Amino acid sequence: MVKPDMQPAAMPPSAGAQRSALRDRFMDPRTLISFLILAVVLVVVLTHVQLDYGASLRAISQTNLLIYAAAFVAFYLSFVVRTVRWEILLRNTGESNRFGELFHIIILAWFANCVLPAKMGDFYRAYLLRQQTEVSGSKGLGTIFSERALDFLVLMSLLVVTGLISFRSSVPAKFVPALVVGLIIALAVVVGLLLLRFSHRRLGSLLPERFRERASRFRHGLLSAFHGRVPLLLGLTVLVWMAESARLYLVVQALPLHVDLNLAQIMFIALVASLLTTIPALPGGLVLVEGGIITVLVFFHLTPSQALSVAILDRIISYWSLIVVGFVVFLLSHRR
């Protein structure tokens, strides 16, 4: 039986049509506004923050390339773990997909998140899943939202734990508002999942008739994704954030900084940076993430120039390398 929202996928669009669609999204006024905001923030940072750019560049020039290469490996290992986790989430909903095709889709989705605001890469991922597999777009989007819920809840749990360890049970006042907002969002995520689980009929009745079937498939993808191997899913999510933390640790070790940061502090800094990427105003959290890394590192007694060196090298891996790799994969996939 053909799924209703699979019908458009019967004849996949040509490479030119898909390239035009992504180009149109890139030229969308909302996307251009996000880059305008980015330019304003960048100008403010460069003109108002006192940084010794020469000292930062000298430190970067002395980077241990072997350790820095290991940071790249740690970062892209996180995508392997994410793919395995998504494969399990889809399997819990009754779908079976190959690792390779899911890995390819995730790389393209993260590339889209780097160049488009509002986490549009997640919707692009659901679109690609529908085009390249037999999974309906609504169900696929549900599994993506379940993955995001796992990511955020585990992220906030680790952030609170590492924060308490780093600050010896007394979180500084400057970090409290961000933690409070994060915890409120985490609570909202849990409440939302419970409402979908126990009040879906009442919520569904509020939707127009034409949306109810898709909403039902979305709910099935979202909630059924948690119906098996929950401990394994939680373990894989922790492993994702450990890989993110390992990347930042290796970046710090690759630089001649001679600083003493313990594991909890490194994890706290990496998790703060990851939390900032969830802010939808800017693609990939550009500038906000760099500013967050510098702020937290300076709080842990690095000089602003040292912190800038870490931020630059870390974002070369977590942002700019993704643009290069994702763009190459995007071109190759359309050529194929």
Image (cartoon, rainbow, N blue to C red):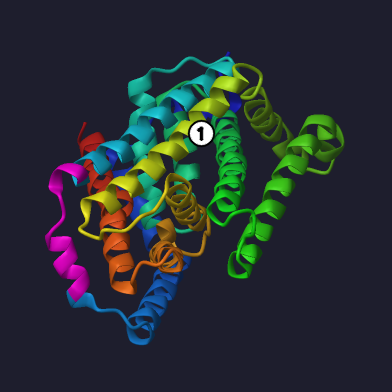
Q: Secondary structure at mark 1?
A: helix
Q: Nearer the viewer, residue 147 or 52?
A: 52
* Residue 323 appears in the picture as rendered: no
Where are the magenta residues, as a range?
Answer: 55-67
* Residue 292 appears in the picture as rendered: yes
Q: Does the magenta portion include 65?
A: yes
Q: Quadrant of residue 131?
A: top left
Residue linked to disc 1: 238
For this view, does 128 lie left or right of residue 177?
left
Q: Nearer the viewer, residue 124 or 131?
A: 124
For this view, does 258 lie left or right of residue 268?
left
For this view, does 79 lie left or right of residue 159?
left
Q: In percent of the image, x 52 and y 59: which residue is there?
A: 280
Q: Quadrant of residue 125?
A: top left
Q: In percent of the image, x 32 and y 40: which residue is there?
A: 75
Q: In percent of the image, x 21 and y 31: which residue is there?
A: 336
- 95 over 169 or under it: above or below: above
The quarter of the picture where the N terminus appears is top right
Amino acid type, mark 1 = Val
**Residue 217 point in image, percent of width and height:** 66, 28
